[in-house]
Amino acid sequence: MEDYKFLFKVVLVGNAGVGKTCLVRRFTQGLFPPGQGATIGVDFMIKTVEVDGEKVKLQIWDTAGQERFRSITQSYYRSAHALILVYDISCQPTFDCLPDWLREIEEYANNKVLRILVGNKTDREDREIPRHIGEDFAQRHGMYFLETSAKEAENVERLFMEIAVELMEQAKCKELPKYDGSLGPINGKTTSVGDSSCCLRS
Amino acid sequence: MDDDLPTDFQVIVVGTGMVESIVAAACSRIHKNVLHLDSSDHYGGLWASYNFDGLQKFIKEVNSDPEKQVQVYNLREQWYIEKESPSEEEKGEAKEDGKTEPSKKIWSQASFAAEYRKFNIDMTPKLLFSRGPLVELLISSNIARYAEFRCVTRVLTWLDDHLVPVPCSRADVFATEAVGIVEKRMLMKMLTSIVAYNEEEMNNEFKDWNDKTFKEYLTHKGLTPNLIHYVLFAIAGGTDAMPCLEGVRECKKFLMSLGRYGNTPFLWPMYGSGELPQCFCRLCAVFGGVYCLNRPIDSVETKTVEEGKTKVVIESKSKTLNCEHLVIGINECPKDLVSPEPAETCDISKAVFITNGTIMKSEKEPLTLLRFPPLVEGGGAVTVLEVGPATGSCPKGLFVVYFITNKVSDAETDLRPYADKIFDLSGGDQTEETDKPKCLWSLFYNVKDTSGAAGSAAAGVHVCSGPDAGLDFDRAVEQAEQIFKKICPGEEFLPRAPDPEEIVFEDDVTHGPEFQREDEDADGDAKE
């Protein structure tokens, strides 16, 4: 068996071009992908981190471009433990779309899912959304808030580590959304959490 | 604003039903340039799952504008409960009383609406055989990672005016008291010869049974009436008229899928069958497929560009889209592109019930397949699926029950007599202790069976049929593979998609490949 104690599914949403893929790749691979080329064949990325001496595996899912014409499959949201909603601080329209995203999240995601609002691209000089506006929005909708720069590696590590810490805490108090009792994946590999013991692997 | 939609593709797929979605995934997987559209704002077409709100919208749409959903008709919705919940006072009392013995929740139309998100109601509920083509495809293509499943926990049938469990596994057969020891031997022997049945080299056991019924065969083998009932109706899902070899094939399918995941040969997708087309769409998108819902098409035209080459031109929202191949769901397809329907299609009668308890008590939450023999002369067998909250189909305390049969007159006439056997359809007090669960809501509807009408009238256009009445997805998978082979002759159908650990990014190469293969993981893959 692989060596980790918890497995969490983290999904990213937000308009096209806000830097979702860059955040994931900065965190999982430590690099900022040059150019805009869509990464063909990439489904989710995995990184194992350590929290309080315990190994936590984060499975981070990207939208596969389906957000471009607002056509994300509902099944994308299923079984997510944490949901990162991303906008671009230098692009007002990506912020204006947040209520639409929230509606979709309300509709399809588990209502106990951990929600984080992220304003990305703090490296940009042409900021359009002041920090406090993002903070206010997050607070009003019961979300955590963070500003990041995937390019400068600012707050990216922190974003995912805080998610790991928070989810682990919840898992220990058994407050996580439970996707209990299901048979889970049929190919014998763990891609999602499978029983009432939350994410604890025996 | 949405019109930065590219216009030229190798393959355009219209409709997100099961067949269309599998074809889209298969084409994209081998790096065809794919655009996938749907006229509505959700995935699945006639194969969709709806939450309760979405279902209400669907019903309204069909009733107010039948032209929009020509495949669905005779739709009838009925409530058996009050509009509003009882007043707060009454509730409070019930709670205090219920401290020692928790009283049943009293459901109202308002409480359904309040919990609408917790419902996932399928228009085309189907099971997967554990070793059937869809499960094998999900595993071999690695699409299985997008879905979760639960095992069907029991198979029931209707015998002597009662619900009875059908022994499924070898252990079940030997444990059951319903079958005597001599019968058990006989049954096992017969099942063994069925498993040995091979279509190509017709073995001796079945060579003289080509023109006889399965029932005649079972009788000939000396099976008692009860055993014949189990095998014919519950395992083969047949009727008295079922041809012998068809019965043998159905039985074999059932038997071969035993012992892989649970005590029955069946799997049910978490959150409903409507999840499955989406899994294929996700794979299509991961490999570069472009997705656009809410995008109806206005017209389709085919043009011969040069000798033997066609171009398909689609008009959609005053934009012209071009492709070499158009794959289109029958529900989205302009009539002139569908080849004339074969005369003898049999439409499908369906019903959905929401009840306040299971049809037969069990220790753990059950997931049930019930197969009714025909209750009237000349009627068809009726398939019933009961799914509970653990499958993500409904809120706690409720069950969703699907009925499917071939249409004789109309859905309600065909199915109500069967529902009457296992539900209390009288409405009234929900807390009342009854031996049958109360039905709280029901929906009857007919669906056109278009599974035979998949031909196409134009080159470069591939029409996908709608849902069939079968228990599984086998026909959809088969049809999708056929269409794919026409579009991409000689190409592999959905080769395994790599795991995230195996992907080397182009732009990493200069830094040296970063990924590390986990050996154990790779071993695990090789096995499946």
Image (cartoon, coloured by chain):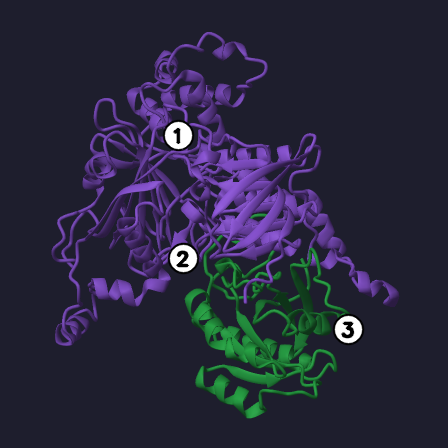
Quadrant in which the N terminus of chain B is drawn? bottom right
* Residue A24 visible to the viewer: yes
Give the chain ID for the purple colour. B
Q: How far across and how far down the image is residue B109, in percent?
A: 22, 62
The total of numbered circles placed on residues is 3
In the rendered image, residues at marks 3 and 2 fall on the same chain = no
Residue at the (20%, 33%) spot, across then down: B161
As drawn, the label of residue A31 is: 3
In the rendered image, the vertical position of residue A167 relative to residue B382, given as above or below:
below
Q: How far across and how far down the image is residue B84, in percent?
A: 17, 67
* Spatial separation of the CA atoms under disc 3 and disc 2: 39 Å
Q: Which residue is mark 2?
A: B392
* Spatial separation of the CA atoms under disc 1 and disc 3: 56 Å
Residue at the (37%, 15%) spot, across then down: B213
Q: Which residue is mark 1?
A: B235
Residue density around tag 2, few if under 14, some if 14–19, many if 20 or more, within 10 Å: many
Q: Secondary structure at mark 3?
A: loop
Residue at the (69%, 68%) spot, across then down: A47
Label 3 marks a residue whose chain is: A
Q: Are marks 1 and 2 in contact (CB under 8 Å)?
A: no
User: Which residue type does callout 3 highlight?
Assistant: Leu
Circle nearer the N terminus (1, 2): 1
Give the chain ID for the green colour. A
Task: Please identify the residue farthest to the top as the structure is shown.
Answer: B208
